[in-house]
Image (cartoon, rainbow, N blue to C red):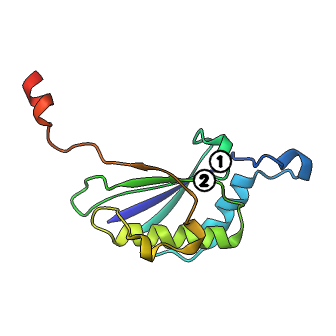
Amino acid sequence: MKTWITICEGCKRSDWNDRQVVETDGDMLAQAIETCPQTAQVETRRVSCTMGCERACNVIIQGLDDAGRAKIGYSLGSFDGTPEDAQAITDFAELHAQSATGQVPFRTWPVGVKGHFVSRHLPLPVEPTPSQADKA
């Protein structure tokens, strides 16, 4: 099973201009996540935009099971880009990787991700649903 943390490196929190920093908040979060210890089950990648600008900093957690089928995925946002955020995101990704379905029991969520979930992405059906089969 493999889980990916997709990090929006272009994210800028609403006060970015006022802080007069050059580096984006998303880039700072990406660097922090990339320095967190991870098992071989978790990989990271950067993208320029996840279109969640109103909730910067954004990450997407998604993965495949041992048979190569998609698991439940999650979008998370409104992080500050701190090392603590990065560790909580990485810890959640590790739990996601260990889960056969991608569902992680709430009681095991790292505190640092609670309140940051934006949406859950259900995997596409492997087999046609009855309504799809009728159309064939």
Is 121 left, or right, of 24 in this rendering? left
Q: Are marks 2 and 1 in contact (CB under 8 Å)?
A: yes
Is 7 left, or right, of 126 in this rendering? right
Q: Residue at x 68, y 63 (%)?
A: 31
Disc 1 crowd rating (10 Å Cα; few below 14, some 14-19, many 20+) is some
Residue 95, x across and y down, in percent: 41, 72
Q: Secondary structure at mark 1?
A: helix
What residue is disc 2 on? 77
Q: Residue at x 27, y 61 (%)?
A: 65
Q: Secondary structure at mark 2?
A: loop
Q: Quadrant of the C terminus?
A: top left
**How far is the residue under mark 2 from the one under mark 1?**
5 Å
Residue 128, x across and y down, in percent: 14, 36
Q: Nearer the viewer, residue 33 or 74?
A: 74
Q: Residue at x 85, y 50 (%)?
A: 22
* Vertical comparison of 108 with 31: above or below: below
Q: Quadrant of the N terminus?
A: bottom left
What residue is disc 1 on? 55
